[in-house]
Image (tube, rainbow, N blue to C red):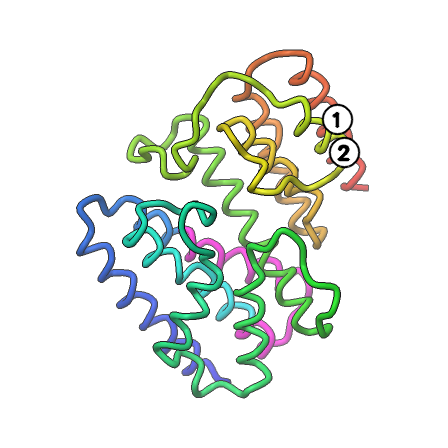
Amino acid sequence: MTDKDYKALVVFFDYYTTGFINRAVNAHPHVTKKNHTVRVVENIVFLGEKLGLSPQRMRLAKAAALLHDIGRFSQFETYGTFYDHASKNHGALGVGVIREHRLLASWPTREKKQIVRSIALHNSYHLPLEMDGDTLFLTRLLRDADKLDIFHVVTQNYLGADPGENGYLTHNLPDDGLISKRLVERVLNEELIDNQQVQSVNDLKLLQISWVFDLNFKAAVERVNRCDFIPLIISTMPNSDHWTFLMAFMKAHMAKKMV
């Protein structure tokens, strides 16, 4: 593929997403996802430069980042939510958009398969054991780039910096002021939390904190640490013994990962 192929994807992405924005009664969710995508592309370039990717591999990474959430727009327009468990898997929806519009028709078959596979798996709880090395690398790179911006978006939301947000970022989950001991224990065991275990806003925050255990590249860890995303998220949770243990543990964990 060439720069021309990638630029064609950028043109399509802008045209496609603008349609959803113009049709929406409340365009804020669509604008948020479009801006998110732009930043994920920037993040994957940042990570790729740190890793010394070749121009060809960088184009591949940028294409995956640009299209990774293309399924989010029809998801929200159809179901009014970004919550996969209350609608459909947005990774699978994105693959459907790519195939419907033949977005990668001009790309080499091997690269096309890598991009589609990485998008299908970018939001998976765990990656399959059987993956070829190049696809695994691209998928891990995309997952880190995506998480970096989600940390940014949700932190701003929890701190009240986005007045246009109306609950869609927290899937309209109840904010009951409680912290689940069971989910805290999963974090303290350095285990990921599954979306199906999330019943409240604080459960969602614990899930997002657990993503630190799934970061793959040092540059991503350094960005999370430098931006204080994890302490900021924890600071918006109810103060309790769980809060104290969690804050101390995560600060120690991040310090360990930085070594």
Q: Is residue 75 left or right of residue 242?
A: left
Q: Residue at x 27, y 44 (%)?
A: 28
* Coordinates of residue 125 in the picture (x, y in percent): 62, 51
The quarter holding residue 10 reads bottom left
The answer to whether the residues at label 1 and label 2 have Cβ atoms under 8 Å apart is: yes
* Coordinates of residue 148 in the picture (x, y in percent): 56, 47
| Secondary structure predominantly adopted by residues drawn in magenta | helix
* Coordinates of residue 17 in the picture (x, y in percent): 29, 61
Which amino acid type is marked by label 1? Phe
Q: Secondary structure at mark 1?
A: helix
How dense is the environment of label 2, judged by Cα within 10 Å: few (below 14), some, or many (20 and up)? some
Which residue in the structure is indicated by mark 1? 249
Q: Residue at x 47, y 37 (%)?
A: 154
Q: Residue at x 65, y 38 (%)?
A: 210
Which amino acid type is marked by label 2? His
Membership of 110 in magenta stretch: no
Name the foreground residue: 106 vs 46: 106
Is residue 32 shown above or below 101? above
How dense is the environment of label 1, judged by Cα within 10 Å: few (below 14), some, or many (20 and up)? some
The numbered disc on residue 76 is none
Which residue in the structure is indicated by mark 2? 253
Q: Is residue 236 left or right of residue 82?
A: right
Which image quadrant: the C terminus?
Answer: top right
Q: Secondary structure at mark 2?
A: helix
Q: Which residues are magenta?
A: 36-60
* Coordinates of residue 41 in the picture (x, y in percent): 48, 60
Name the foreground residue: 59 vs 79: 79
